[in-house]
Amino acid sequence: MVEGPDCFIHIFLSVAARWRGHYKNSEEPMQLQVARIGKPHGIRGEVTVQVLTDAPSERFVAGTEFVVEPASAGPLTIRSARWNKDILLLGFEEVADRNAAEVIRGAKLFVETEELDDGDDDEGWYEHELVGLEARVGSRVVGKVAALTTLPVQDLLTVKADDGKEILVPFVEEIVPEVNVEGGYILITPPAGLFEINDENPKESKDDAGDDA
């Protein structure tokens, strides 16, 4: 049993591990969440994906293997990756049909990386400064900041839309280029599919509709 000052550190690391999904010691690669699996698409095992990285063209290529949370759903290896308008669709070697795709719905995808975002520590933001700010894409208000999750590799903002849906937004300069506390908003330049992934009835192209017939 851990006691004394070490007890607090142990609890802190345990909580951080749950947020990140997989805790590893500092000598091993860190694990960075890059996506969350959405709904099945079609009958061939493809799934929609909520992109949580600013480099999707590098992260989602055939042959890439992901660590998955929950572990029972993985690992998963990309078989195919394509865009349907603004939504990324992934096929996995381990997922052959729509039924199997339904089983992994909601799973989180991680990649191992040794790169830490040491960033501009002096320019960080506290959660209480961000919660309640409007989240804007251009001049359009898409929701409000509900929470900030601070992780070792990459922080995440939770944006709550007007319809109650929660969207995870990587808190990096490429995606959140402006934080204006005095003006009461943050500006988001989302990667394709970041907000559309949670639509209940995403529009499919005519070609996709034909494939599903």
Image (cartoon, grey):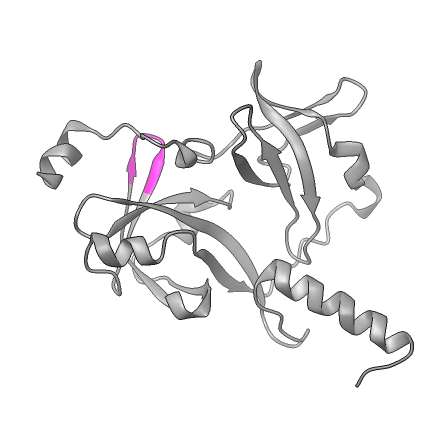
Query: How many numbered marks does the figure carry?
Result: 0
Closest to the observer, 8 or 112: 8
Closest to the observer, 54 or 88: 88
Question: Which residue lies most toward the top here?
Answer: 139
With 147 as the anchor, is 95 left or right in this view?
A: left
Residue 15 highlighted magenta (yes or no): no
Closest to the observer, 160 or 126: 160
Give the image location of residue 50, x and y in percent: 44, 43
Magenta residues, start to end? 83-88
Q: Main secondary structure of the magenta part?
A: strand
Residue 131's place in the image compared with 79, above or below, is above
Question: Which residue lies most toward the bottom here?
Answer: 1
With 210 as the anchor, is 49 left or right in this view?
A: right
With 162 as the anchor, is 98 left or right in this view?
A: left
Give the image location of residue 145, x and y in percent: 66, 32
Does residue 52 appear in this view?
Answer: yes
Quarter that holds the C terminus: top left
Q: Residue at x 84, y 43 (%)?
A: 122
Does residue 74 appear in this view?
Answer: no
Residue 35's place in the image compared with 70, above or below, is above
Question: Which residue lies most toward the front here?
Answer: 164
Give the image location of residue 173, x and y in percent: 64, 37
The picture quadrant where one finds residue 76 is bottom left
The picture quadrant where one finds residue 187 is top right
Give the image location of residue 180, x and y in percent: 75, 23
Q: Residue at x 77, y 40 (%)?
A: 127
Q: Residue at x 57, y 39 (%)?
A: 169
Q: Residue at x 62, y 33 (%)?
A: 176
